[in-house]
Amino acid sequence: MKEEQVLAADYDKDISTRSSTVSNALVLPKKNDVLVYSFCRSKTFIARSGVNPLVAAASALFSLISKLRHTEQYENSTNLRENLIYEVKAFECAALERHYQAEQIVLARYVICATLDETIVQTKWGRESDWHQYSLINAFDGDETTGERVFALLERLHNKTKDSIDLLEFFYLCLSLGFEGKYRLIDNGHQKLDRLLDDLFRTIRLERGDNLSSLVMMKGSRSAAPSKNLPKLPLKRILMVLGAILVVIYFSFIMMLHIEIKPVYQLLSTIVADTTNNDA
């Protein structure tokens, strides 16, 4: 616990510098009294609504997590990295347009980049690439302690729930979609992470009250993490954890997500096809 507090404190020391990179990278000089932004258009899509506006701003990145996990081969990691960096910057811009502070965007960017990096390096093609050396975290933060720092930052946010509820939901969704960090390497890590998620769910529930429809759908998705394969979820496991009602909600969420991420699937398919043609 003490080590996590040190990690969070170290990150806080230069968060103002990190925050300035968000606005400085996106805002160009005024043209006809209108701010001109670069990277403001996602190559895929940005949802109009979601669990909260911050999550909606990162909708393309969240959708890519599942697609990347199930991609069996990807030879052009440089092309993938460039596209993901573009989408992260599009998220930053969308979050700014939704009136989030730069400090909040930096924290959200950190956890979504850590989640994407971990997703990629857990694949065969990711392990065989140079992704560890040129990860998204390195591109934006130059950090190598994401496995621990994500949870240090989460604990810090947990202590000021009222002001951090959107970020807490953002972190919750990243964990639900499979980020494990240090818990991947410790004894009984999955069980400990499940308890942490349950505690986080209760915290968000206390703050959000009865408005839990989105949270319930998020809560169901963590059961997919051990298998890393949503379509092949053991139904018995879901029934034991959530009960029959949550199973219905869960599969409704999967159907809705499938509809939302269809443009993303098409983009990645195009990228893969281009890579294959270039290699040929």
Image (tube, helix red, strand yellow):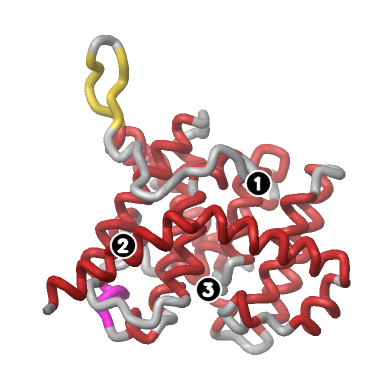
Mark 3–mark 1 distance (CA, rounded to whole Å): 23 Å
- Lower position in the chain sequence, tag 3 or tag 1: 1
Which range is magenta? Answer: 129-133
Three-letter code, disc 3: Gly
Mark 2 nearby-residue class (10 Å; few <14, some 14–19, many ≥20): some
Q: Quadrant of the N terminus?
A: bottom right
Mark 1 nearby-residue class (10 Å; few <14, some 14–19, many ≥20): some
Q: Is residue 87 magenta?
A: no
**Count of numbered tags:** 3
In the structure shown, which secondary structural element does the residue marked by tag 2 occupy?
A: helix
Type of secondary structure dominating the magenta stretch: loop
Three-letter code, disc 1: Val
Mark 3–mark 2 distance (CA, rounded to whole Å): 16 Å
| Quadrant housing residue 228 | bottom right
At horizontal 28% and vertical 70% (from top left) the residue drawn is: 272
- Lower position in the chain sequence, tag 3 or tag 2: 2
Residue at the disc numbered 2: 138
Residue at the disc numbered 3: 181
At horizontal 37% and vertical 68% (from top left) the residue drawn is: 144
Relative depth, front residue between 79 and 258: 258
| Quadrant housing residue 141 | bottom left
At horizontal 41% and vertical 76% (from top left) the residue drawn is: 71
Residue 157: x %, y % from top left: 63, 50
